[in-house]
Amino acid sequence: MPVELDSTVVQRNADRVNNNRGTKPIVIVGMMGAGKSTVGRRVANFLDLEFIDSDDEIVEAAGMPIPDIFDTHGEEEFRAGEMRVISRLMRTRSEAVIATGGGAYVNETTRKNISQHGISVWLKAELDLLFARVSRKNTRPLLHTADPYQTLKDLVDERYPIYANAEVTVMSHDTTHERIAAEIIEALADHLDPTQRA
């Protein structure tokens, strides 16, 4: 059985984050299947902030689902739209936790934007855990290949050195979403307020 979260500790860490983040949103980056949206909602809840999934914002702006954007316009146009949407979110949604798509942080312009206007958290996960999760649904356009596992491995090899530029890194592992969210809050608190580290 997982150990119960100590709500007093979580709240103390959440207060440290909110007292020290200024007007910057928390931006969660990482691979598809890492749990950015699911965990991000819990992080937003702990911090009493709005939760935004940048993919949902892209779908709304484009008026079509992401697989259709890929099919109709190609990946390059999707990435351009993603860059515009995240740029807008960085300017207009400071009181938020924003989960980004797996490829967003790979874009240099987006990465600089997040670095300047947000606080980045890499939700990192082992390849096998990612593959187990993404295999449950056939909704990932980048994995529509002859060998999805190898494709995912190639993406991990390419992207992990880039994700490592994030200000905070937290491992996604086999536990509750609430616990990983609490671990993100603690890591953010220690990053933003190192003098009060437990």
Image: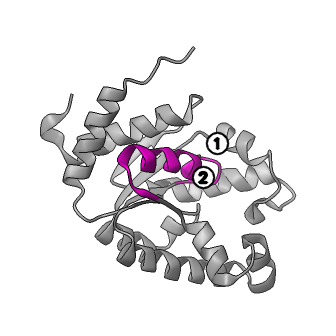
Q: CB of mark 2 within 8 Å of CB of mark 1?
A: yes
Q: Foreground: 9 or 90?
A: 9
What range is drawn magenta here?
30-50
Q: Foreground: 192 or 142?
A: 192
Please name the residue shown 21% across and 28% down the image. 198
Q: Position of residue 47 (x, y in %)?
A: 36, 48
CA separation, marks 2 and 1?
7 Å
**As shown in the figure, which amino acid type bears the numbered disc 2?**
Val
Q: Determine whether 182 is above or below 59 in the image.
A: above
Q: How crowded is the residue under tag 2: few (<14 C-alpha within 10 Å), some, or many (20+)?
A: many
Please name the residue shown 57% across and 53% down the image. 37
**As shown in the figure, which amino acid type bears the numbered disc 1?**
Leu
Mark seen at residue 127: 1
Q: Secondary structure at mark 1?
A: helix
Q: Foreground: 154 or 107?
A: 107
Please name the residue shown 48% across and 17% down the image. 3
